[in-house]
Image (cartoon, rainbow, N blue to C red):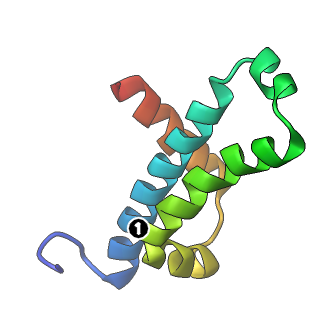
């Protein structure tokens, strides 16, 4: 691992950046839902639609929750990574 990353923090930061991009994609998918669709859903259906994709992601990537609790939450960095991911599509 250290062949690719100079230290542990760099490795964790790179992993965290990947998770931020993936979670941003989940948010983008929700954001693509039109207002009329949201209004037509019951409160339970809205909660299910928002939470189900996130819960499934965290079930598949349990270490993301661990990193979430220890990584600094730099919103500007997250935004830059998310913007970069959108531009690469």
Give the vertical position of 4 relative to 80 (above or below): below
Give the vertical position of 40 relative to 7 (above or below): above
Residue 62 in the image, given as x and y percentages of width and height: 46, 76
Give the vertical position of 61 relative to 25 (above or below): below
Residue 2 in the image, given as x and y percentages of width and height: 18, 80
Residue 57 in the image, given as x and y percentages of width and height: 48, 60
Q: The residue tagged with tag 1: helix, strand or loop?
A: helix
The residue nearer to you, when weighing 28 against 77, is: 28
**Residue occupying image coordinates x 30% and y 81%:** 7
**Residue occupying image coordinates x 39% and y 74%:** 12
Q: Badge 1: how crowded within 10 Å, few (<14), some, or many (20+)?
A: few
Q: Work out which quarter of the rendered image holds the C terminus and state it.
A: top left
**Residue occupying image coordinates x 75% and y 21%:** 37
Q: Work out which quarter of the rendered image holds the N terminus and state it.
A: bottom left
Give the left or right position of residue 59, taking residue 37 as reference: left
- The number of callouts visible is 1
Give the left or right position of residue 65, taking residue 10 as reference: right
The residue nearer to you, when weighing 75 against 7, is: 75
Judging by the rendered image, the residue that carries numbered circle 1 is 60
Residue 58 in the image, given as x and y percentages of width and height: 51, 67
**Residue occupying image coordinates x 63% and y 80%:** 69
Q: Residue furthest left?
A: 3
Asked where in the image residue 39 lies, by quadrant, the reply is top right
Give the left or right position of residue 23, taking residue 32 as reference: left
Give the vertical position of 77 relative to 15 (above or below): above
């Amino acid at each position: 691992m250290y062949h690719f990353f100079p230290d542990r923090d760099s490795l964790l930061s790179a992993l965290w950046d990947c998770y931020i991009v993936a979670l941003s994609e989940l948010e983008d998918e929700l954001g693509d839902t039109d207002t009329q669709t949201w209004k037509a859903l019951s409160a339970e259906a809205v909660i299910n639609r928002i939470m189900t994709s996130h819960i499934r992601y965290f079930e598949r990537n349990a270490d993301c929750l661990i990193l979430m609790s220890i990584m600094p939450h730099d919103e500007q960095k997250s935004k830059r990574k998310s913007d970069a991911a959108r531009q690469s599509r």
